Image (cartoon, rainbow, N blue to C red):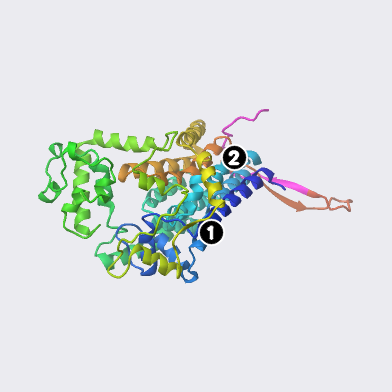
Amino acid sequence: MRHPVFAVVLTLGALLRLLTMLGYRPAMYFNDSFDYLHVAIEPYPHPLRPGGYSFLLLALKPLHSFALVTALQHLMGLAMGLMIYAVLRHRFGLPGWGAALAAAPVLLDAYQIQLEHLVLSDTLFAFLVVCAVTLLLWHERPGWKVAAAIGLLAAAAWLTRSVGLPVLVGLCVFMVLRRAGWRALTVMLVTCAIPVTAYMGWFAGVHGKFAMTESDGVFLFARAYKFADCHKIPDLTVDEQQLCVLPGNKLPNSQDGIWDRRSPLKRVVDLRFGPRQNEIAGGFSRKAIMAQPGDYLGVVAGDFFRAFRWDREVFPDLKTYRMYEFEKSATPLPVWRMDNDSTAADEAVRYEAGPAQPRVVEPFAGVMRSYQDHVYVRGTMLGGLLLVGLAGLVPLWRRFGGAAFLPWTLATGLLLTPAATAEFDYRYVLPAVPLASLAAALAFARPLGAAPARRRSRQALPGDDTEDAEDTTVVPDDAVRERPAVASPA
């Protein structure tokens, strides 16, 4: 009752997620889902992607329920909305309707809800990042316990998706700019390094390389494949020359440079995402970028600004595009081989310990299909949120943009990093939405620390036998040092 607008938005978000679980049982799958499942069933450091999400699946495996996995991910989506609302309402003093409006994109976006229903790492990653940002904004000068928690969250995000490394950098930069203290920064870095180093040691023991994955060079080749012209690239080795393709013979999309059977990467005799293939692809790509910086910046800019288009065009192909849609019929489980003993469908059945084939149940599924046709954050809206957040940074430029600096830079970085190192994908856009919403809302908030923290102390006045509470306002030192970003109407 104290938060009526947010209560309505949160309840509606929960009902939409319930309809999704009723309409699409037990879960929805993406191509990558089965790699995560394979690691959860037979744990090993996957050469293509970090194992953080597989660890979550492994922890839930004894319960044999994809419905439980998706339910937990839907709770993560609701929790992100709750954190955005809480930090804006109670830490920065936004009115309830304003904080609820900022939480609405993550709570009500149909594609966000569909992503939560996929067996994929993206929801977990976004949840971990929002948790870390919330903690750091709530505690401007965190103690060692809070700093340790932020470090563990940053490590978990990095172990869930490789793009977690730029997130860690962003957290560190913000702590330095806000003078959080070297002790807190050291504790954060140490607690982050311990699990990451342990995982990389495990990876080295299996693959012979101290790293998180064996795929960074291959994915960078997807970026370079689009523009690389071997006539302009000097000093290519014999192995790297195998990756040359005449401009007129190139496949249409960047990702074809990795996944298509006609990719020049298939000329390198090696295991898929093996060390030799990764080394040759990475060397070729770096030389191409250095030789053609203008072309490289062009394809990066093209993918970055693709995220801000009003309409969701079919990209990169119809099959991939439809995996992000609530469909009328379920796609059969794939039967490609995961190893010598199992197929992708076998892995899903083993995890569920029973039928794992998705089922579409009406009328619930129909409601979500209609909802997805109309209610989602369009790319232009996301761009608008980032512009509003940027406008909020400008008045506080002497203080490096204030609190909004953290979510704004992380949101922009999460959009830019895939465009710079791999390729555009619609699911890479969604983790930036809650951060962009938070940054936009902070443009209308008071600076960090200026929102009063209220506490009630009951003190009886002399000669007064009543127990009326005295509302004591405690204003942190920061409130004295910083001026509000937006002037009061008075």
Nearer the observer: mark 2 or 1; the answer is 1
Instruction: Identify the residue at image location x=39%, y=59%.
Output: 333
Instruction: Identify the residue at image location x=78%, y=48%.
Output: 470
Residue 101: image tag: 2
- The amino acid pointed to by label 2 is Leu
Q: CA distance from mark 2 to mark 1?
A: 24 Å
Instruction: Identify the residue at image location x=16%, y=57%.
Output: 269
Q: Is residue 428 left or right of residue 362?
A: left
Tell me residue 110's x, y (percent): 51, 45
Label whose residue precedes the other's in the sequence (2 or 1): 1
Depth check, front residue: 296 or 379: 379
Residue 258: image tag: none
Label 1, residues with CA under 10 Å away: few <14, some 14-19, many ≥20 = many
Residue tagged 1: 71
Instruction: Identify the residue at image location x=61%, y=42%.
Output: 100
Label 2, residues with CA under 10 Å away: few <14, some 14-19, many ≥20 = some
Depth check, front residue: 430 or 435: 430
Residue 484 falls within the magenta-colored stretch: yes
Depth check, front residue: 348 or 459: 348
Residue 174: which quarter of the image? top left
- The amino acid pointed to by label 1 is Ala
Figure check: 46 above or below 462 = below
Label 1 secondary element: helix
Label 2 secondary element: helix
Q: Specify start and end residues of the magenta stretch as a single range.
A: 470-490
